Image (spheres, rainbow, N blue to C red):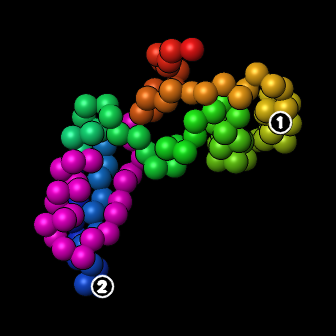
């Protein structure tokens, strides 16, 4: 469900869905905000939405780098995990091209 707020002359839209991070964006016109919210919610419901922070991740190496920088640093044993990730990235077989579906990396259906 989208929430609309007017702040400093701009319309802020925030979309919250279960199992998805909160998505927000600002617009100068309320009609543009409504159109964006409808389209984004439709993409989420059909499974076509990809969060902007993982759109640029197209190789396993890039995915491991992002995981190390975002997830691993929040863990207790992050130093060891980052070292393991660095070893995995140093190997040549992590240059595999990924076909990422929105938030379903574990169920990749990618032609090789």
Horizontal side of 12 relative to 94 (left or right) equals: left
What residue is rendered at 52% in x and 49% in y?
53
Relative to 74, does residue 84 appear above or below in the rendering? above
User: Mark 2, mark 1: which one is toward the viewer?
Assistant: 1
Asked where in the image residue 66 lies, by quadrant, the reply is top right
Find residue 17 and name its label: none
Name the spot of residue 94 as percent of width and height, x first: 73, 26
Callout 1 crowding tier (Cα within 10 Å): few <14, some 14–19, many ≥20 = some
Q: Residue furthest left?
A: 31
Relative to 38, does residue 89 appear above or below in the rendering? above
**Figure label count:** 2
Q: Are marks 2 and 1 in contact (CB under 8 Å)?
A: no
Q: Is residue 84 visible?
A: no
State the residue in front, 41 or 77.
41
Q: Is residue 83 visible?
A: yes
Give, as a single range, the part of the protein colored magenta: 19-40
State the residue in front, 45 or 91.
91
Residue at mark 1? 86
Name the spot of residue 39 as percent of width and height, x first: 21, 48
What residue is rendered at 25% in x and 31% in y?
46
Callout 2 crowding tier (Cα within 10 Å): few <14, some 14–19, many ≥20 = few
Name the spot of residue 47 as percent of width and height, x first: 31, 31
Asked where in the image residue 18 lies, by quadrant, the reply is top left
Q: Does the stretch in magenta take in 35?
A: yes
Residue at mark 2? 8
Quadrant of the rendering where the C terminus is positioned: top right
Alpha-carbon span between mark 2 and mark 1:
44 Å
Closer to the chain start, of discs 2 and 1, is: 2
SS class, disc 1: helix
Q: Does the stretch in magenta take in 73?
A: no
SS class, disc 2: loop
């Amino acid at each position: 469900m989208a929430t609309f707020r007017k702040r400093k002359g701009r319309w802020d839209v925030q979309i919250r869905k279960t199992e998805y991070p909160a998505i927000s964006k600002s617009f100068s016109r309320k009609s543009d905000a409504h159109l964006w919210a409808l389209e984004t919610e439709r993409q989420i419901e059909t499974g076509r939405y990809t969060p902007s922070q993982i759109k640029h991740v197209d190789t396993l190496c890039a995915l491991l780098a992002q995981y190390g920088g975002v997830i691993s640093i929040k863990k207790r044993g992050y130093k060891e995990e980052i070292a393991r990730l660095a070893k995995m990235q140093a190997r040549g077989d992590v240059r595999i091209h990924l076909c990422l579906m929105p938030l379903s990396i574990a169920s990749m259906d990618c032609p090789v």
